[in-house]
Amino acid sequence: MNRVVYSTDQGRHCPDCSNPIDNCQCKQPSAAPTGDGIVRLQLETKGRKGKGVTLVTGLPLAGAELKKLAKELKQRCSTGGAIKDGVIEIQGDQRKILEQTLQAKGYTVKFSGG
């Protein structure tokens, strides 16, 4: 198999589709995830040494929109957080505050988990 990894003409190439990184076809940004239209809030402590984290799943957003919403939610809760695999993680048990904030934005919100 003859795969080009680097070319002096075009620079780095994608190892999967062999196109230049700028024109990579296999790693195009995906469209917003689709679901049942319900945003779910879940408190998770497993694997976190007893520290609780509120997970926000089911948001029909991707990329910059998701990042912008995560920043707004973190500011509203006055705490830290992260985005991992399309799921917003907010430190602590912030379910009530997040429920109010997301409902005000027009989302249908449900609590999931225990």
Image (cartoon, grey):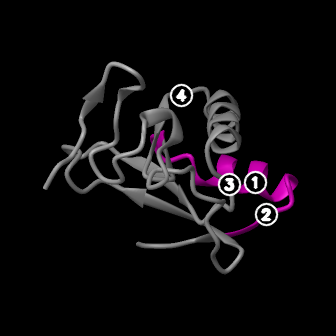
How packed mark 3 is, by other alpha carbons closer than 10 Å (few <14, some 14-19, many 20 or more), is some
Query: Distance from label 1 to label 3 (Cα)?
Result: 13 Å
SS at mark 4 in the image: loop
| Three-letter residue code for mark 2 | Tyr
Residue that numbered label 2 is attached to:
107
Of residue 80 and residue 100, the one placed in the foreground of this image is 80
Q: Which mark is residue 79?
A: 4
Disc with the residue nearer the chain's start (4 vs 2): 4
Looking at the picture, how far across and down is residue 111, in whole percent? 57, 70
Residue interval drawn in magenta? 90-109
Please report the residue visible at 58 percent of the width from the left and 54 percent of the height from the top: 95
Tags 4 and 3 in contact by the CB under 8 Å rule? no
| Three-letter residue code for mark 3 | Leu
| Three-letter residue code for mark 4 | Thr
Please report the residue visible at 43 percent of the width from the left and 73 percent of the height from the top: 113
Q: Is residue 80 left or right of residue 32?
A: left
Q: Is residue 4 above or below residue 10?
A: below
Tags 1 and 2 in contact by the CB under 8 Å rule? yes
In the image as oriented, which residue stretches furthest toward the bottom?
Answer: 36
